Amino acid sequence: MGYTTMGFVAGVLLAAKGNVVLGPLWGFLSSSMWITGTMSFAFVPEVAARTPIYAIVLMTLAVNFRYAFYGFSMLARWKSAPFWRKAYLILMLTDENYALEVASPFKDPKRHIAYCTALSLFNHSYWVAGVTVGALVVCALGFAVDPDVIRGWTDGMEFAMVALFIVIFTDQIRSFVENGR
Amino acid sequence: MAGEIVYMLGVVFAVFAVNYALRALPFVLFGGRDRNLPQWVASLGSYISPVIILALIVYSYSGLRWRTPWPYLAGALTVALHLWRRNPLASIVAGTVLYMCLVGCGCTTAETSLAYDGAHPLIRFSNTGIRFKDEYVTPSRAIELLEENQIPHDATIHILVDDDFTDRRATWVFQHNYLARAGYSRSVLVSKRVATSAAVDSKPRRAAESAPGKPQKIRYKKADE
């Protein structure tokens, strides 16, 4: 459910502040291809300002650098997964999925992989649905209400991204303290 | 339109490629081998990631109203709630809602909330009367509202005059007997066409940045002309 709510906010922001045509289409495309909540929030002001793509690439590198370390704990457990299955699991290696997969109760690799796949499929659909519906709602409202008014309503919603960063940071510091490293 | 679609496609595919490459990196590097990952990689990850995220928090605060206390209050609530409940969704939603309330409840300064450039004329003359931001007012009430909103005296006051409003004497009296006497010596009459073209010019940029200070490309008449 968390995914749908966060996705909805991201979709609303994209359509209301992204300053692009066809907001729902981009919401759907981006959410289905990169399941990274942080970038879905962070790229909205950049797109609105038409930041060059290389700058957005650099930003993605910085924002999502932590993902490069998630795979290490999954190396052994996903060894037996078929190629495409593994490719999909890698695509879905988000903060939330990673936390759940590491804490997975299944020790048997086969059942663990099945569990991860089901988890990823559900979270993927929740996320895509959230973003797309959020963007669609804003677009539908756009026919009835002045876009500037919608922008006024969503004023302050950009804090969701900062709050997400703060939550990730708090978790990282907590695991740091608890592991004693 | 076409350029915009190409740009958005480029953004979507670029972020996808970088994101996927980062996530697949360990599998590509160590996938084929049986050895364990070096200890230094794990410790590197646990040190670098928090630093990057902290830098991102600082950076993203620059996009908020960081001169006001509101983002810090909302941030403190987010941290406290997350330490207490460990529920990411609850922390994020609570922090965001608090920030939206604080920002939305008139806790901002007048300068940032009220645009008074050529694209957003505050005062409008029409055959049905004088309006100050869609509110019908008397001339003296309009001056009071200007003072209340702390519009600086040296700002150029744009007055939107409807095309069918032909009483030039009324606008002249307003500019000289009301605005100039209250200290607003720079006022400008603009027509609907000029105002909308100024609005189109300034819209793609961020409204708050382009609003005050920047000279708009408007031919205007000075009050004492």
Image (cartoon, coloured by chain):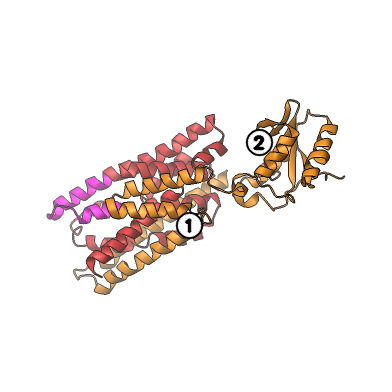
Chain colours: A red, B orange
Work out whether residue B16 can be spotted. no
Dot 1 lies on which element?
helix
For this orientation, the residue located farthest to the top is: B128
- A55 lies above or below B115: below
Q: Main secondary structure of the magenta part?
A: helix
- Point 50% across, 46% down: residue: B103
Compare marks 2 and 1 and give the one earlier in the sequence: 1
Q: CA distance from mark 2 to mark 1?
A: 31 Å
Q: Is residue A107 above or below residue B218?
A: below
Residue B19 in magenta stretch: no
Q: Position of residue B32 (x, y in %)?
A: 23, 66
Magenta part of the chain: A96-121
Query: Residue A67 or B168: which is nearer the viewer?
Result: B168
Q: Which residue is mark 2?
A: B133
Q: Which residue is mark 1?
A: B61
Residue drawn at 65 percent across, 32 percent down: B134
Question: For the C terminus of chain B, which image quadrant?
Answer: top right
Co-location on one chain, circles 2 and 1: yes
Label 2 crowd bin: few (<14), some (14–19), many (20+), radius 10 Å = some
Question: In terms of image quadrants, where is residue A60?
Answer: bottom left
Disc 2 sits on a residue from what chain? B
Q: Residue at x 45, y 41 (%)?
A: A12
**Magenta span includes A101:** yes
Q: Amino acid at mark 1?
A: Tyr
For the residue pair A145 and B141, the one nearer the viewer reads as B141
Across and down, in percent, residue B7 comes to 52, 50
B87 lies left or right of A152: left
Q: The disc labelled 2 sits on which kind of residue?
A: Lys
